């Protein structure tokens, strides 16, 4: 796959011949310097952006041939997104932020269950301003998984967090991956996080420079920040 952004007279080749398979129920960490194309790839995998050339398949379906309507359905039913900033609605409680999504999903988990998975059963009636950064991110994760997506795409989910709260977020992601079998891709700048993954995919200049399978993984609590 390639992705070229045209801005003014300048062409930026954000992805330059990337070929990658993500396997069902795997946890993959995408590492690489700033500007190496990680977010671009994640956005294309999630149906938020389109490749310039090449194809993307999800369980045998060619996403690249999808109409806008089919893409919207794919995003809504199959993909959960988690970003560096939590994008919660400030006037809604944690429970309500999750419920907003479960109202439009086909077979959602009850918001209570999604919040319990991220260990926030005791914060359901709090508003975002009454939650720490790590807690807000866990609400965002509960919101992303409440529709039971097959794929969870996380772009710098711990980027704005200190090590202690970041570890709680990684614990939530690991638990979801193990208990729900959700295929999970995590972009990070923090090389320490790669040891929690099944597989590490390293990017340089819009290309995959290396992939590495971890024979042994460490628990999030052991990640050195
Ligand atoms: N919408 C856009 N329009 C123009 N250029 C873009 C756009 N999005 C990304 N780029 C460029 O594409 C390249 C890859 O960006 P991308 O965000 O995918 O990298 P990244 O590895 O995720 O970086 P970071 O870790 O800093 O988020 C960069 O040079 C960036 O400036």
Image (cartoon, grey):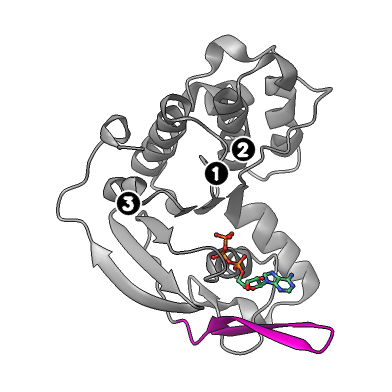
Cα distance in 3D space between marks 1 and 3: 25 Å
Residue at 53% x, 43% y is 157
Residue at 39% x, 44% y is 177
Q: List the residue tagged with mark 2.
A: 108
User: Magenta stretch mostly in which secondary structure?
Assistant: strand
**Left or right placement of residue 189 versus residue 200 in this view:** right
**The magenta stretch spans residue 27:** no
x and y, in percent, of residue 173 in the image: 43, 39
Q: List the residue tagged with mark 1.
A: 148
**Left or right placement of residue 180 versus residue 96 in this view:** left
Judging from the image, what secondary structure is the residue with disc 2 in?
A: loop
x and y, in percent, of residue 7 in the image: 80, 81
Circle 1 Cα neighbour tier, 10 Å, few/some/many (<14 / 14–19 / ≥20): many
Circle 2 Cα neighbour tier, 10 Å, few/some/many (<14 / 14–19 / ≥20): some
User: Nearest the camera: 24 or 217?
Assistant: 217
In the picture, the disc for residue 194 is: 3
Label 1 or label 2, whichever comes before in sequence order: 2
Residue at 64% x, 81% y is 51
Cα distance in 3D space between marks 1 and 2: 6 Å
- For disc 2, does the CB lie below 8 Å from ligand 1? no
Magenta span covers which residues? Answer: 1-18
Residues marked 1 and 2 touching at CB (< 8 Å): yes
User: Nearest the camera: 10 or 193?
Assistant: 10
Depth check, mark 1 against mark 3: the one in front is 3
Label 2 or label 3, whichever comes before in sequence order: 2
Compared to 83, does 117 lie above or below?
Answer: above
Label 1 or label 3, whichever comes before in sequence order: 1
């Amino acid at each position: 796959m390639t992705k070229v952004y045209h801005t003014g007279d300048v062409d930026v080749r954000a992805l330059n011949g990337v070929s990658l398979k993500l396997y069902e129920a795997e946890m993959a960490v995408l590492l690489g310097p700033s500007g190496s194309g990680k977010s671009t790839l994640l956005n294309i995998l999630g149906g938020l952006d389109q490749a310039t050339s090449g194809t993307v398949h999800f369980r045998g379906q060619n996403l690249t041939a999808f109409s806008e309507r089919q893409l919207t359905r794919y995003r809504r039913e199959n993909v959960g997104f988690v970003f560096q900033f939590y994008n919660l609605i400030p006037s809604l409680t944690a429970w309500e932020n999750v419920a907003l999504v479960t109202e439009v999903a086909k077979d959602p988990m009850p918001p209570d269950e999604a919040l319990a998975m991220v260990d926030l059963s005791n914060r359901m009636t709090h508003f975002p301003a009454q939650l720490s950064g790590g807690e807000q991110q866990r609400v965002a994760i509960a919101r992303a998984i409440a529709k039971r997506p097959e794929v969870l795409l996380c772009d710098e989910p711990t980027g704005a967090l200190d090590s202690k709260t970041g570890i709680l977020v990684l614990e939530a992601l690991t638990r979801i991956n193990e208990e729900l079998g959700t295929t999970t891709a995590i972009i990070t700048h923090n090389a320490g996080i790669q040891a929690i993954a099944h597989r590490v995919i390293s990017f340089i200049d819009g290309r995959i420079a290396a992939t590495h399978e971890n024979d042994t993984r460490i628990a999030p609590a052991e990640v050195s920040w």
